[in-house]
Amino acid sequence: MIDHITIAVSELEKSKSFYESALEPLGYRLAFGKEGVFWAFDVGGSLFEIQRTDDKPPFTRLHVAFRVHSRAEVEAFYRAALDAGARDNGAPGPRPDYGENYYACFVLDPDGYNIEAMINAPAQG
């Protein structure tokens, strides 16, 4: 379970808009923040936070995986993220190298972070 992850972003408002759109199909919402400093999204009891970089690139690149409830949510996230400006980094599909029932997609957000939506459960119906 993720408590919170904070990443530095180059354009705070652009990233805020991106994540509001990309996370909406998963039912995740902006929780709180401080204009011009950071924003925190409630991602199912955990927090995903973005903060400004003061025009300095982040020291490290980061991968974040959002656990979802269905393969349909993986696909909805992927479509919404691409519509919000993400770049494809792996279309929705099985990832047998990660696990027998692992199903995921990967996108690169506006700053090039590798963002994943995944489920590790047998396909339903």
Image: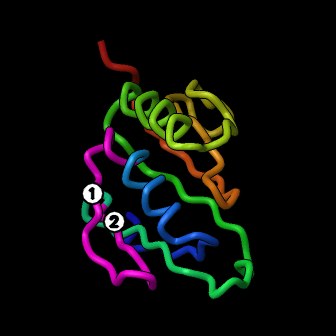
Q: Quadrant of residue 39?
A: bottom left
- Residue 25 belongs to magenta span: yes
Q: Is residue 44 above or below residue 50?
A: above
Q: Is residue 39 left or right of residue 59?
A: left
Q: Residue at x 41, y 30 (%)?
A: 76
Q: Is residue 117 shown to the viewer in this render? A: yes
Q: Which residue is mark 1?
A: 29
Q: Which residue is mark 2?
A: 41
**Span highlighted in magenta in the image:** 23-42
Of residues 24 and 14, the one drawn nearer to the viewer in this rendering: 14
Of residues 97 and 56, the one drawn nearer to the viewer in this rendering: 56
The image's mark for residue 110 is none
Q: How many marks?
A: 2
> Which quadrant is the N terminus positioned in?
bottom left
* Dot 2 or dot 1, earlier in sequence: 1
At which x and y percent is residue 102? 52, 34
> CA separation, marks 2 and 1?
6 Å
Q: Are marks 2 and 1 in contact (CB under 8 Å)?
A: yes
At which x and y percent is residue 73? 37, 32
Q: Residue at x 41, y 67 (%)?
A: 48
Characterize the local packing of mark 1: few (<14), some (14-19) or many (20 or more) Cα atoms within 10 angstroms: some
- Residue 53 belongs to magenta span: no
Q: Is residue 102 shown to the viewer in this render? A: no
Q: Residue at x 58, y 43 (%)?
A: 85
